Image: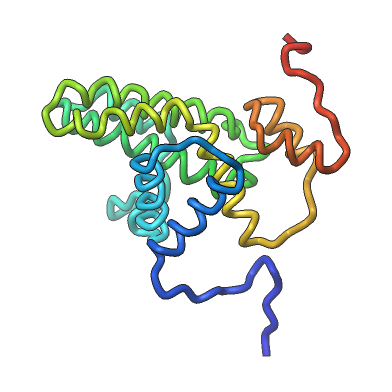
């Protein structure tokens, strides 16, 4: 009989949307994060959608995987109309938030690191907020996109916490955590460092 550990255990959940809502809202409440309900609901729906690999990955019949964010941005720039451009900007923001929230460790050592994903995702949502205000349908979502842009780092921290609570892993990679704090200014990373007895020096001291 195979015994699963904390990293490979499978936890059955009756309703994925309710599961993510409870997890995300729990972290937001525990940490006193100021995120409006519409933005929270957007993130919960995003997690539910991208839990299905066919929604997350691109499949053109020949290749299956994630297109680099830079190529997505090029597609957005070359889009023939505003609707398709906005769709690509939303895709960039969504992918960047999901990957940096749940798979940040996989970005370590790559040419594009966590700070790149945070910058690209926040910028995409910011552009989408501006673009959306020019359409009747988009105006209803413009403020939400604007909040996603302004609080992208905060939301990444929230999703990191959701991920780590499921891992139930008490070991902290201090060097990786310090690198995340150094590059992004993440409050969560700073708190994790302090919990391990490490007092990070102000980033301004390096500038």
Percent coordinates x, y for residue 189 in the rendering: 70, 37
Residue in the image at 54% along x and 44% along y: 101
Percent coordinates x, y for residue 35 in the rendering: 45, 37
**Quadrant in which the C terminus is drawn:** top right
Vertical arrangement, residue 165 with respect to residue 123, above or below:
below
Residue in the image at 67% along x and 66% along y: 7
Vertical arrangement, residue 186 with respect to residue 3, above or below:
above
Dividing the picture into quadrants, the one containing residue 19 is bottom left
156 relative position to 108: left or right: left
138 relative position to 38: left or right: left
Q: Looking at this rendering, what residue extends furthest in the right direction?
A: 197
Dividing the picture into quadrants, the one containing residue 124 is top left
Percent coordinates x, y for residue 81 in the rendering: 14, 26
Vertical arrangement, residue 198 with respect to residue 134, above or below:
below
Residue in the image at 64% along x and 46% along y: 105
Which sits in the foreground, 193 or 102?
A: 193
Image coloring type: rainbow
Dividing the picture into quadrants, the one containing residue 126 is top left
**Quadrant in which the N terminus is drawn:** bottom right
Which sits in the foreground, 175 or 199?
A: 199
């Amino acid at each position: 009989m195979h015994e699963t550990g904390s990293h490979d255990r499978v936890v059955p959940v009756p309703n994925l949307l309710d599961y993510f809502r409870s997890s995300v809202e729990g972290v937001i409440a525990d940490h006193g994060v100021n995120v409006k309900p519409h933005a929270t609901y957007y993130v919960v729906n995003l997690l539910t959608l991208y839990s299905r690999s066919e929604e997350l990955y691109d499949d053109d019949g020949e290749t299956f995987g994630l297109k680099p964010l830079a190529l997505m941005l090029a597609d957005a720039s070359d889009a023939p109309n505003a609707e398709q451009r906005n769709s690509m900007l939303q895709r960039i923001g969504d992918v960047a938030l999901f990957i940096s929230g749940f798979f940040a460790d996989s970005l370590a050592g790559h040419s594009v690191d966590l700070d790149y994903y945070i910058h690209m995702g926040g910028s995409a949502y910011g552009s989408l907020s501006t673009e959306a205000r020019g359409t009747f349908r988009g105006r209803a979502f413009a403020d939400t996109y604007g909040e996603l842009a302004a609080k992208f780092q905060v939301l990444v921290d929230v999703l990191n916490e959701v991920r780590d609570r499921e891992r139930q892993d008490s070991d902290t990679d201090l060097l990786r955590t310090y690198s995340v704090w150094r590059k992004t200014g993440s409050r969560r990373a700073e708190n994790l460092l302090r919990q391990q007895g490490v007092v990070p020096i102000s980033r301004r001291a390096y500038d």
